[in-house]
Image (cartoon, helix red, strand yellow):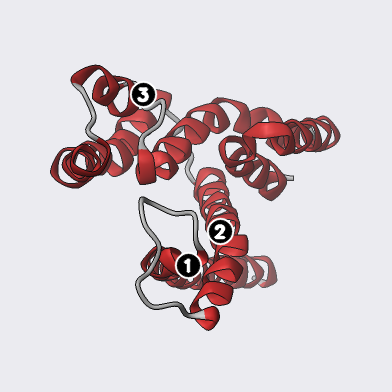
Amino acid sequence: MMKTENNETVIINRKKELENCVFVKTFLMFSIVLYHSMAFWSGGWFTANAVYKSKILSIFSQWLNSIHIYCFVLVSGYIYCAKYLEDGNRNFLNFVRKKAKRLLVPYIFTAIVWVIPISSIFFDLDIITIVRNFVFAINPSQLWFIIMLFNVFLIAYPLSDFFAKHNISGLAIAIACYIIGTGGGICFLILLFCGIVCVI
């Protein structure tokens, strides 16, 4: 009887944690939008500087830029890990379909409706550059984050069982990924690192 009550308490606590994470993730999404609305004031973004200078907006946008993406990826990794551990039916193809629907469909829609037209106006893109940047996602402008999340989920999912069962090896690989990531690919590897650490 006591064991059942403890299990129910753990389930309730886990649900509460996930609800809190969803709230934090929503707040972080808002902070990403807020940062992009103030990025002109930090200088060196897009094609021009803001007409009116604002030191406060400049400092605040730089501060947001130093934390918002990393925190968002950390929380996404935690939520992914919690759901992965709870889910008994682990089918890779279903997982890929689900992530494609959640990430690639919005990527394609936003690229066609917003990013490609605006980028073409400001940067005079030809068809080869458009295919290179957006179809092959080599330089997809502000949509890089969606592609990064999709790629990291594809890498993390097949490795998740291994990391759940091999704590020390998983930790060593996670640290190695972090070190490699700081050398140039941290945006690509950080979700993998967070997901692995979450499992450990």
Which residue sits at x=58%, y=72%? 13
Residue 146 can be seen in this image: yes
| Three-letter residue code for mark 1 | Leu
Vertical side of 5 occupied by 197: above or below:
above
CA gap between label 3 and label 2 equals: 24 Å
Q: Check disc 2 and report the residue beneath it.
A: 75
The reply, left or right, for residue 87 in relation to residue 8 is left
The answer to which of 170 and 128 lies nearer the viewer is 128
The answer to which of 123 and 185 lies nearer the viewer is 123
Tell me residue 61's x, y (percent): 52, 70
| Three-letter residue code for mark 2 | Val
Which residue sits at x=47%, y=43%? 87
Q: Check disc 3 and report the residue beneath it.
A: 93
Q: Earlier in the sequence, mark 1 or mark 2?
A: 1
Q: Earlier in the sequence, mark 3 or mark 1?
A: 1
Tell me residue 195's x, y (percent): 62, 44
Mark 3 or 2: in front is 2
Q: Check disc 1 and report the residue beneath it.
A: 28
The label shown at residue 123 is none
Q: Which structural element holds mark 2? A: helix
Q: Quadrant of the N terminus?
A: bottom right
CA gap between label 3 and label 1 equals: 29 Å
Quarter where residue 7 is shown: bottom right
Label 1 with label 2: CB-CB less than 8 Å: yes
Q: Earlier in the sequence, mark 3 or mark 2?
A: 2
> What crowding class fits label 2: few (fewer than 14 Cα within 10 Å), some (14-19), or many (20 or more)?
many
Q: Which structural element holds mark 3? A: helix
CA gap between label 1 and label 2 equals: 9 Å
Which residue sits at x=26%, y=21%? 131
